[in-house]
Structure formats: structure tokens, C-alpha cells
């Protein structure tokens, strides 16, 4: 029951971040999360095109704050504490999903799970 409540809080927080990102970032489409064996969800920000994703990622390299801040806030509001939030954040786009996974997002999102150390 507690995990379900935690996930609902994460979804609510990611929904708010998603709406903000849609207003501020051209080409941003949606955000989701994937549960991991470690218990920390991986947050994946999805873009319409590879170009929009590349531009957002270039901006994230210059100023990583916003994507990481939105992700950290969502994890925090869900009651999840992580030391290395960047490890749990990924970027993807619709074309890559079609190319790598035949449009199957369940399969595509598995590509974002952190590798065991």
C-alpha cells in the first residue's frame, strides 16, 4: 500500500513538471518513470524528434539544472531520497522508439534502466 501511495505522489509531481516543460521546452512531449530493481524509479523525458531531444540535451550539458531539478523534485515529493539523481534520469524520443523498439515504449524504456555497478 505504501509503495502505491509513493507512486501516486511521483506521478502527480511528474505531471506538474511535464506541464511546465511543455510550456518551456520546444519539442518536449511527455515524461514517464520506470520501476527498477533498486526501488528508485528511472525518470525518462521524451521528445517529439531527435533534434528536439539533442537541443534539450545540449542545453542540459550547458546548464543541467532544470531537468535534474524537475526530476529531483518529483523523487523528493514521492518520498524517495537519492544521492546521484542524474543516474536515474534519461532522455528519449519518438523516432528512436520506432527505430530501436518498433514503437513499443515498454521495451524502449527498459534501455534507460541504470546498469548495475
Image (cartoon, rainbow, N blue to C red):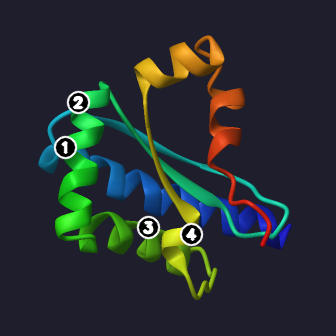
What secondary structure is found at the residue carrying circle 4?
helix
Please report contact status of discs 2 and 1: CB closer than 8 Å, yes or no: yes
Single out the mark in the foreground, 2 or 3. 2
State if disc 1 and disc 3 touch (CB < 8 Å).
no
Q: How many marks can you see?
A: 4
Going 62% across and 26% down the picture, which residue do you hit?
Answer: 105
- Left or right of 5 in this view: 102: left
Q: CA distance from mark 1 to mark 4?
A: 20 Å
Q: Are marks 1 and 4 in contact (CB under 8 Å)?
A: no
Q: Which of 25 and 23 lies nearest the eye of the viewer?
A: 25
> What residue is shown with label 2?
51
Q: Under tag 2, what secondary structure?
A: helix
User: Mark 4 = which residue?
Assistant: 87
Image spot of residue 66 (x, y percent):
25, 68
Mark 2 vs 4, N-terminal side: 2
Measured in 3D between alpha carbons, the distance from the residue under mark 2 to the one under mark 1, in whole angstroms, is 6 Å
Horizontally, residue 75 falls left or right of residue 69, namely right
Between disc 2 and disc 3, whose residue precedes?
Answer: 2
Q: Which residue is mark 1?
A: 55
Q: Nearer the viewer, mark 3 or mark 1?
A: 1
Query: Secondary structure beneath disc 1?
Result: helix
Q: Residue 115 lies in what quarter of the image?
A: bottom right
The 10 Å Cα crowd at callout 3, few under 14, some 14 to 19, many 20 or more, is many
Q: CA distance from mark 2 to mark 4?
A: 23 Å
- Between the C-alphas of marks 2 and 3, the distance is 22 Å
Label at residue 43: none
Sooner in the amino-acid sequence: mark 3 or mark 4: 3
Residue 87 placement, left or right of 29: right
Residue 71 disc label: 3
Marks 3 & 4, CB-CB < 8 Å contact = no
Amino acid at each position: 500500500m505504501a509503495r502505491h501511495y509513493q507512486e501516486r505522489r511521483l506521478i502527480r509531481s511528474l505531471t506538474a513538471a511535464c506541464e511546465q516543460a511543455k510550456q518551456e521546452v520546444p519539442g518536449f512531449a511527455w515524461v514517464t518513470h520506470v520501476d527498477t530493481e533498486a526501488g528508485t524509479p528511472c525518470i525518462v523525458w521524451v521528445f517529439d524528434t531527435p533534434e528536439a531531444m539533442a537541443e534539450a540535451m545540449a542545453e542540459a550539458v550547458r546548464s543541467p539544472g532544470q531537468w535534474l531539478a524537475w526530476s529531483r523534485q518529483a523523487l523528493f515529493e514521492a518520498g524517495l531520497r537519492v544521492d546521484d539523481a542524474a543516474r536515474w534520469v534519461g532522455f528519449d524520443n519518438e523516432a528512436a522508439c520506432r527505430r530501436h523498439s518498433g514503437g513499443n515504449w515498454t521495451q524502449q524504456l527498459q534501455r534507460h534502466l541504470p546498469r548495475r555497478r
